């Protein structure tokens, strides 16, 4: 079987390392991981109530999803919330752009990637954080977000969505609103969850209550405002 050149290079890179070298590298990685946690906790603990907006990095500026995400972010700032995104282009840029337009807090949690990711210009200069490790970045999203607004996206968006749902389901963190925007886009996934996961007994019907599905910015705000009439605003763990 033919192995792509990139796979060959990765395999050769690891084959050249001894177990002792791998162990040494792992030990040093601990300090880098710790530094990302410390920096993230210190800087994000000061941002106040924020809502995270997720979605595809590939969404263009003139796409309806981009325009809607920017409008949602703007309206969130008018209701006293800041906006947190992954700091990159597409829906992330739209979220930061709307927050900036609304003169609200605009946070970008950037991740080092070989493609797609670059900082957008709408992040507050003192609120742009760079991460090497996805899992550290995901902790920051969950800990300091008062809600998740999930726009249409790909694997990364799905990753954040199911991570949040799992943590709430297993009571590792407190409950907060998870809002899918775009009934048409998300209906196939939700049908599969209902017809397969629930019917097979792999999740409870009650778990479906963790998610709201909406189509407009006003519906997003209604879900979040209604939720926080009953619960106080605070970090999630």
Image (cartoon, grey):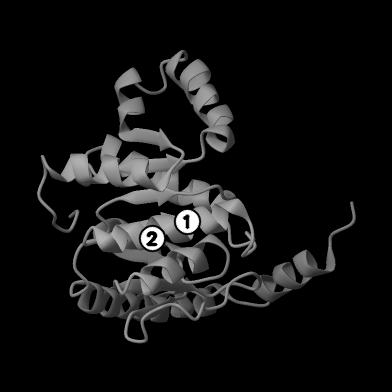
Looking at the image, is 147 positioned above or below residue 135?
A: above
Task: Pick out the residue farthest to the right.
Answer: 2
Report the front residue among 115 and 69: 69
Dot 2 crowding, Cα within 10 Å, few <14, some 14–19, many 20+: many
Tag 2 and tag 1, C-beta contact below 8 Å: yes
Determine the image quadrant of residue 220: top left
Residue 111 screen position, x and y as percent: 49, 72
Residue 98 screen position, x and y as percent: 42, 66
Task: Pick out the residue farthest to the bottom.
Answer: 125
Q: Alpha-carbon distance for marks 2 and 1?
A: 6 Å
Residue hosting label 2? 73
Residue 200 screen position, x and y as percent: 47, 15
Looking at the image, is 190 positioned above or below residue 157?
A: above
Residue 1 screen position, x and y as percent: 89, 51
What residue do we see at 29% from left, 71% from top?
Answer: 104
Dot 1 crowding, Cα within 10 Å, few <14, some 14–19, many 20+: many
What residue do we see at 24% from left, 79% from top?
Answer: 43
Tell me if I can see residue 22 in this picture: yes
Looking at the image, is 233 positioned above or below residue 186?
A: below
Tell me if I can see residue 55 in this picture: no
Question: Could you tell me which secondary element the residue under label 2 belongs to?
Answer: helix
What residue do we see at 51% from left, 33% from top?
Answer: 183
Q: Quadrant of the C terminus?
A: bottom left
What residue do we see at 84% from left, 59% from top?
Answer: 3
Which label number is shown at residue 69? Answer: 1
Task: Pick out the residue farthest to the top.
Answer: 199
Relative horizontal placement of residue 22, taking residue 82 as reference (left or right)? right
Question: Could you tell me which secondary element the residue under label 1 belongs to?
Answer: helix
Relative horizontal placement of residue 98, taking residue 55 as reference (left or right)? left
């Amino acid at each position: 079987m033919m192995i792509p050149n990139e796979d060959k290079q990765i395999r050769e890179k690891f084959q050249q390392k001894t177990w002792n070298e791998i162990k040494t590298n792992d030990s040093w990685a601990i300090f880098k991981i710790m530094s990302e946690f410390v920096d993230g906790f210190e800087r994000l603990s000061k941002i106040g109530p924020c809502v995270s907006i997720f979605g595809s990095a590939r969404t263009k500026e003139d796409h309806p999803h981009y325009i809607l995400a920017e409008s949602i972010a703007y309206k969130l700032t008018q209701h006293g919330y800041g906006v947190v995104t992954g700091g990159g282009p597409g829906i992330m840029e739209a979220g930061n752009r709307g927050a900036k337009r609304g003169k609200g807090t605009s946070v970008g949690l950037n991740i080092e990637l070989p493609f797609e990711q670059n900082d957008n210009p709408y992040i507050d200069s003192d609120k742009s954080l760079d991460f090497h490790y996805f899992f550290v970045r995901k902790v920051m999203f969950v800990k300091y977000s008062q809600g998740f607004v999930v726009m249409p996206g790909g694997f990364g968006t799905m990753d954040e969505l199911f991570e949040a749902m799992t943590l709430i389901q297993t009571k590792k963190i407190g409950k907060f609103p998870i809002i899918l925007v775009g009934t048409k886009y998300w209906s196939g996934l939700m049908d599969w969850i209902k017809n397969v996961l629930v019917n097979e007994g792999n999740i409870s019907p009650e778990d479906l209550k963790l998610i709201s599905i909406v189509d407009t910015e006003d519906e997003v705000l209604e879900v979040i405002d209604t939720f926080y009439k009953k619960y106080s605003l605070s970090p999630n763990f």
